[in-house]
Image (tube, rainbow, N blue to C red):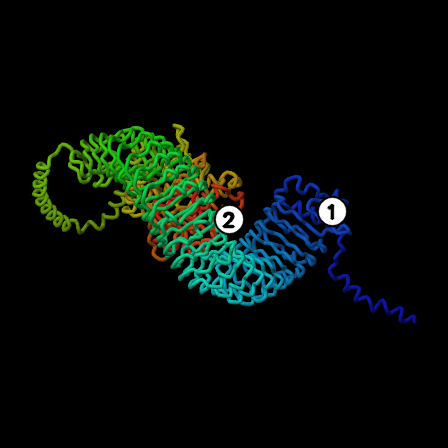
Amino acid sequence: MTKSTATCPLFLFPFLCLLFLLPFQASPSPTTEAQALVKWKNSLSPPPPPPSLSSWSLTNIPHLCNWTGIACNGGGLVTGIGLSGSSLNGTLDALDFTSFPNLTHFDVSNNNLKGPIPSSIGNLSQLRFLELAVNFFEGAIPRSIGQLIKLEKLDLRLNKLTSSIPSELGLCSNLTYLALAKNSISGELPLSLSNLVRLSLFRASHNRLSGELLPDFFTNWTELVSLKLQSNFISGQIPPEIGSLTKLNHLSMYNNSLSGTIPPEVGNLTLVTSLYFGMNQLYGKIPETISRLANLRKISLCSNNFSGEIPRDLGKYSASLKSVCFANNSFTGELPPDLCSGFALRYLMIQGNNFTGPLPDCLKNCSRLTRVRLDSNQFTADVTSAFGVYPNLVFISLSNNRFVGNLTTQWGECTNLKTLQINGNKIAGRIPPELGKLSQLRAMTFYSNDLTGKIPDEMGNLGELLSLNLSNNHLAGDIPISLGNLSKLNYLDLSKNAISGSIPDELANCKNLLSLNLSNNNLSGVIPPELGNLFALQILLDLSHNSLAGSILSNLAKLTKLENLNLSHNNFSGTIPAALNSMSSLGSIDLSYNKLTGAVPSGRLFQQASGSAFIGNLGLCGYVTGLSPCGTSSKSTNQRKKVLVGVSVGVCCSLLLAILIAMILLRRWRKNLLDKEEAIKRLKKHEKSEQIIWERLGKFTFSDIAKATNEFSEEYCIGKGGFGSVYKAVLASGQIVAVKKLNALESNNVPTVNRQSFENEIRVLTEVRHRNVIKLHGFCSTRGCMYLVYGFVERGSLAKVLYGGMGAVELDWGTRVNIVQGVAHAIAYLHHNCSPPIVHRDITLTNILLESNLEPRLSDFGTARLLNSDSSNWTTVAGSYGYMAPELAITMRVTNKCDVYSFGVVVLEIMMGKHPGDLLSSLLTTQTSTISEDANLMLKDVLDPRLPPPTGQLAKKVAIIVTTALACTRTSPDSRPTMHFVARELCARTQAYLSE
């Protein structure tokens, strides 16, 4: 007995040692939990604003359960942390999750938290709800999440998560809510997710997911109510097993790469209300079984390759059908007769197909219609009887069909209508005066029809109208004086009609006009002097092909923003006013076929104009192509030509003989002296060039620049790039300029021919004049460098402002819209109004500068292509990485469509608040530029999350801009619009708030 007592402790001693070696875990207490919370709070930087976490203090431990966002159990231990929308900044690294073994809820959504999701989060064994949405978490989803076997809700939306979905997530068998949307998650959906048999909501849209949809998902997810996988790269066919999701309410798979047909088993989804398959590569016919979906409210199949007819019974059993989008397919035949039998239809978007025949009778009584697009089909309906009264209608387009009949007075009862488009049909008759009651109308496009009669005076009542296009009809009579009441009008086109009388003075009251086209009519009289007060006129003034007479008034020179002026084919007489030279933005002028006399002014505008701009004016003369020099006759000119021909022949023969003799005499010693003579020649030339070029400025010299920058000291350097450095120079006169110093111009590196080419083209760039293009004052080459002198812009680059601390505050949505419009006009000017046209080649946020009022100025235009590939800093590659058009990698050929692509990328960057990056590859496969109801869902995901979403009219403007950016970034250069079209459409459609 004594021996046993003595040996027992010795026997247990090794086990006691092993016990002490194991990790020690203290039991949780309010004190340890409070300490862990305060430690994490102190790690947040900057600290959260009061009073959000003011109660979190170690002096307040007894009241832990009353701390902000803290919930406890009966024992006073923490079971919930809820800090959604608390303006938290920092990471989760300092939060010790092991201190909270009883935690069931953890919600820090809608904050500014960043960094990775700690793998230690897997220690929360009791966790049921994990909400980290709307933050900036990055990296991969930790595999340790698979340890949270009690987890019911996982919300990781709107972060910056990457990598793939871990297969361990399939171990969370109690999950009912899984949201991973709007991250950058890639890879395939792991098969293990099919184990989530309780899943009712799965949202993984707007990521980079790929691979196919496995049948096991649909056979096991029988509890699924909502499935959203849109805007990914999912491919393959839609499995027939999708019919197993009998509880499904919402199915969204638009904007993927799905192919094949829609399986008829979709008809088994009897509870589905929303069905989105748009923007894929699906084809074939719509299965008849879709007609059985009695609860269907929204269906979108837009932008696929569907063909055939729409099932005849579609809508017959779906009394709540609210939205139909079949746009941009190859559907044929007539619309189903019961499409809107329930009279609930609000959105009907079927443009861009081959539909034919009349419209269904039920459409006439569908009074809830809000937005209708029937354009670009082959409808032959009679508009006189096909439409009814739609008090909620905001937008309708019947354009480019074969509609016939007359417009009825009922259209005047659609009092909420903002856009009415009927262009490109065979609609006849008069324009109903009742349209003047549409007080909210902003765009009326009736061009290319068979309309007759006068323009109603009541059109002057449309006080909100921004765009009025009645061109290419048979309208007659005078231009109503009442049109002068349209003070908000931007675009007025009455061309190609039979309108007579004079141009009313009252049109000058349309102070916001950007484009005025009255060409191809029977107008007479003179140009009203008041038109010179249309200071906003920018895109076009076209009065050609009329019977206007009198002189061209010099006060047109006040239209300094105007880019295109056409007064051709009239009876104007007198001389061309020299004052027109001051129209700095004018890039195109046509005064041909008038009765003008005298000398053509000698300014740049006229000397660079096409010779056809002045033909048909027998009394004009000057040093312009197609005109005789002033003071000469044709006879004397012919005599001179004969003399010159005779002299030229003799001179050429003499020169040829002299050249042959010189070649023989100089051949022996020319080789030895050539290099030395060329070096001296280059040196002298550039020394002379420095003086000549700077004398052209007439305001300052290179010495002034060098003095103002203390010989280009680093303290005056405000930026550096691949081509050199930029310096701020305050001259003695007080003028501030920006000087770009381009390196690597040593004579051994740059051939003389390239220097000369560079200088010649820079001279051309100094003539560019546009309010959204930075002024290039001049240049100089000396000391082995080239110096370009620009106007100084106060705020610096758009990149600096957008990514600065106050970028989201300063650049609100309205400001961003204005910046995009300004840049568009600048590029359009370079492409279409400069002679020769200028391709920018390097459009980025860095090359867009902002004035103090945030007005944009495009810089570095045209200089990128002048660099020499033989130099280390000079390259023939056009553009910056991330902004270059994809075709450059293959063709290495730069066109203006490369600029269009770069512009699209820049616009997306402005709207997203970050470079599109991974999104670009998705945009390159997008072949539609229409934001329909489906695409509006996508729009929310490309907007800068630092700003509250735009609303109302501003939201429509932003939608148009994003749509345009998508069109600009199309893969095929030929499918991209021109910048002239982009600038015109942005201005017209954002003003008209058309979300097309």
Q: Is residue 954 above or below residue 139?
A: above
Secondary structure category for the residue under label 2: helix
At horizontal 36% and vertical 56% (from top left) the residue drawn is 356
Q: Is residue 663 left or right of residue 943?
A: left
- Name the residue type under label 2: Lys
Q: Is residue 378 above or below residue 13?
A: above
Q: Which residue is mark 1?
A: 65
Q: Position of residue 988 (x, y in %)?
A: 39, 41
Q: Is residue 602 left or right of residue 664?
A: right
Say the numbered circle drawn on residue 525.
Answer: none
Q: Position of residue 977 (x, y in %)?
A: 36, 49
At horizontal 38% and vertical 28% (from top left) the residue drawn is 733
Q: Which residue is mark 2?
A: 940
Q: In 3D space, how far apart are the residues under numbered discs 2 and 1 (Cα atoms)?
A: 38 Å
Count of numbered marks = 2
Secondary structure category for the residue under label 1: helix
- Name the residue type under label 1: Cys
> Which of the marked residues, 2 or 1, is nearer the chain's N terminus?
1
Toward the viewer: 207 or 899?
A: 207
Q: Position of residue 415 (x, y in %)?
A: 45, 40
Q: Is residue 171 left or right of residue 412?
A: right
Residue 273, picture quadrant: bottom right
Toward the viewer: 171 or 906?
A: 171
Binning the other alpha carbons within 10 Å of mark 2 as few (below 14), some (14 to 19) or many (20 upward) gives some
Q: Depth-wise, is mark 2 or mark 1 nearer the camera? A: 2
Q: Quadrant of the N terminus?
A: bottom right
Binning the other alpha carbons within 10 Å of mark 1 as few (below 14), some (14 to 19) or many (20 upward) gives some
Q: Is residue 934 above or below residue 596?
A: below
Toward the viewer: 270 or 83?
A: 270
